[in-house]
Amino acid sequence: MSFRTAQIRLVSSHREVYEPCDDSFALVDALLSDRNNLIEHHPTLCMEVGSGSGYIITSLALMLGQEASGVHYIATDINPHAVRVTRETLEAHGVHSELITTDIASGLEKRLAGLVDVMVVNPPYVPTPEDEVGREGIASAWAGGENGRIVIDKILPIADNLLSDKGWLYVVTLTANNPSEICLQMRQKGYAARIVVQRSTEEESLHVIKFWRDFDTQVDLKEMAATNKTVPARVMESLVSQFPLSAFWRSGPQ
Amino acid sequence: MRLLTHNMLSSNIKGVANGFPLRIEVEKVVEKKVDLNADFLRNIFPKIEWKAFAEAARTLGYAELPEDADSSFLDSDDFLDKFHHALLELHLEEGALICPETGRRFPVNKGIPNMLLHEDEV
Ligand SMILES: C[S@@+](CC[C@H](N)C(=O)[O-])C[C@H]1O[C@@H](n2cnc3c(N)ncnc32)[C@H](O)[C@@H]1O
């Protein structure tokens, strides 16, 4: 089967909507490289936070199929123009996602908790002055405040609440975001992590990190709580071996 | 917006205790046929708040759903057809969602609910 995401057309654009860029391509490449796992994962509900042009969610829907396959999609963006462009991109490719204009997943936390099997996020991650974060218009597409972490740090606990037991989360990060620290933070919530794609451009080094709830991690956490020890050595080793700029991709069942 | 999404949305205004279900104000409903997947329907059924769902379907002009439903209904093809139609084929294209506690109106345009809050509501 020829793969169609390479042909995603931007049918619509808007000067206040983020156009697909290196980070968007890295995320789609990550999803493509994990495609067989994703298909075997049999997700029921996939979600994108910050869908922008719709490039990612449209690619995912083409990759995993629609209602007949039992896969459903929901995408949000804080920028109303972006959500409208997402709709047009989806329609132009004959796929459907439910869409909501909202801050991250506000309004969904209660009833959608524990139902999302795959979440994808290319967040605003550029370090900027704090007051640029969440402003109206295109700045909110990239402005991430101190270390570019403000929006990411809001998204992670919300993702943890929405993800199902078998839920997977794919997030784009920049080296400046301190991705190993993000992994440690997620580890404390019981998630294992793997770098799916690592890519350096002239200005930045991007990582697409995949998180999943991990039984071993949860056992480690219980041990830590019981023995009052800090992060076990082997956890640190596996994280350090992946960062920074490591071209080493851990292979594994996930 | 499908009724599946309506069933997952609550009013997000600060201080609201019972923000579910959002009342629906209808301006325009569209129907789009999609393939039925019985496994999906069986898996999602326990997650659906049935009363809110049946009421929402009625508001959109579809009155074929029973008032109450339990998992034994899922053996009936007729029930699955109706459940599928109301859950996935009816779209609120234009209208609004109303917070049941405060009456705050969240507009729905081109099928997209806008849940953004004003500063004093966050
Ligand atoms: C880097 S762009 C990515 C756009 C698109 N997903 C892509 O990969 O090309 C980040 C997107 O997140 C949106 N965004 C920023 N803050 C948000 C928030 N608090 N809630 C939802 N979306 C947000 C922006 O409007 C923007 O569309």
Image (spheres, coloured by chain):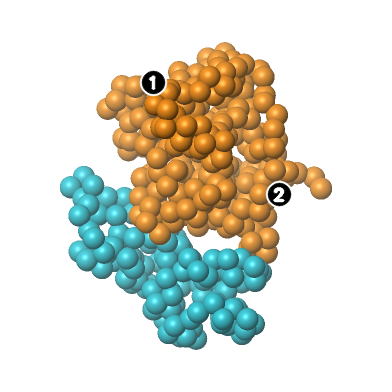
Q: Residue at x 31, y 28 (%)?
A: A132
Q: Position of residue B29 (x, y in %)?
A: 46, 73
CB contact under 8 Å: marks 1 and 2: no
- Relative vertical location of residue B62 with respect to residue A37 in this rendering, above or below: below
Residue of label 2: A40
Q: Residue at x 67, y 45 (%)?
A: A38
Measured in 3D between alpha carbons, the distance from the residue under mark 1 to the one under mark 2, in whole angstroms, is 36 Å
* Image side of residue A222 versus residue B108, left or right: right
Give whichever of B86, A166 is nearer the camera.
Answer: A166
Host chain of mark 1:
A
The numbered dot on residue A50 is none
**Type of amino acid at the residue the image marks with label 1:** Asn
The numbered dot on residue A147 is 1
| Rendered-image quadrant of the C terminus of chain A | top right
Secondary structure under tag 1 reads helix
- Do the residues at discs 1 and 2 belong to one chain? yes
**Type of amino acid at the residue the image marks with label 2:** Glu
Q: Position of residue B49 (x, y in %)?
A: 42, 71
Give whichever of A200, A202 is nearer the camera.
Answer: A200
Secondary structure under tag 2 reads helix
Give whichever of A9, A56 is nearer the camera.
Answer: A56
Looking at the image, can residue A239 be seen?
A: no
What is the residue that sits farthest to the front in this orientation? Answer: A227
Q: Residue at x 29, y 55 (%)?
A: B12
Chain A takes which shade in the image? orange
